[in-house]
Image (cartoon, rainbow, N blue to C red):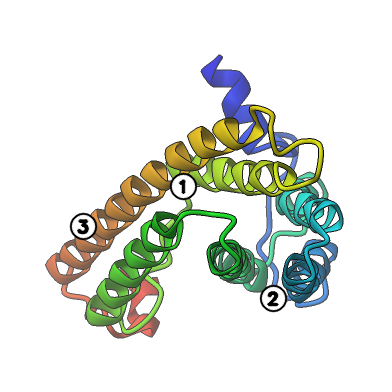
Amino acid sequence: MRGSTVRLIGAGHRDDIEYEVTDRIWTVPNVITILRFCLVPVFVWLVVSERYLAAFIVLAVLSSTDWVDGYIARRFNQVSTVGQWLDPVADRLSLAVVAVTLVATGIAPWWLVLSLLLPDLALALTALALFRGSPELEVTVLGKVRTALLLVGTPILLLAQVPGLAEGPLTVIASVVLILGCVGHVCAAGDYIAGCARKFRRLRAEGVDPRDRKSWARA
């Protein structure tokens, strides 16, 4: 079961090639990531207009393309330095905007926003204090599972607002998935903060200034 989960999360990975991280900006995965983020304001407008079914479809596309761009990058060796930071940034911003929109319109509970934004704020402050920017840590399996749960739970919650479906079990299912996702988000943030501390101590022990990024290559 664990092997299947890992294959799903890292789908597209190939053992028959040697991956090369390029400096190209306009790769197919990066274009998909940019287009995905451009759909966020469309989603906000649809929710505010109470066009919930259309908003659900847009959010489902947002959620699925988060997996698609990673698959293409791994399958066709299009991993890039831009994509390595653009994809997680787009994910975090998209989730934050989606959560704020759902809470502001009364669709989602207030704890959804707090459980997403507060851990991210703590992680951002830690990274700025220790590294003056991103610690450049690898995304963990916990982090990917957390994101998947949140990207599944929010569309289900939105679908539950569609007339004829509101009285069904969708709200309960969405709440359970979102709770698991939020708990995972808090745990993932704690894990990344611990990773920041470990990397900071390692660099210091090797005589490298953690705030001098150019010296990291020598570590």
Residue 173 point in image, percent of width and height? 58, 30
Q: Which amino acid type corresponds to the residue marked 3 in the rendered image? A: Arg
Against 118, residue 19 (above or below) is: above
**Would you name the residue on which mark 2 appears?**
23
Q: Which amino acid type corresponds to the residue marked 2 in the rendered image? A: Asp
**Would you name the residue on which mark 1 appears?**
143
Q: Which amino acid type corresponds to the residue marked 1 in the rendered image? A: Gly
Instruction: Identify which residue is drawn at 70% across, 41% down.
Output: 160
- Which quadrant holds the N terminus? top right
- Report the residue that reaches farthest toward the top: 1
- Residue 55 badge: none
Between circles 1 and 2, the one closer to the viewer is 1
Instruction: Identify which residue is drawn at 71% across, 36% down.
Output: 11
Give the mark nearest the N terminus, 3 or 2: 2
How far apart marks 1 and 3 lie (CA) works out to 18 Å
Residue 63 point in image, percent of width and height? 72, 51
**Would you name the residue on which mark 3 appears?**
198
- Which quadrant holds the C terminus? bottom left
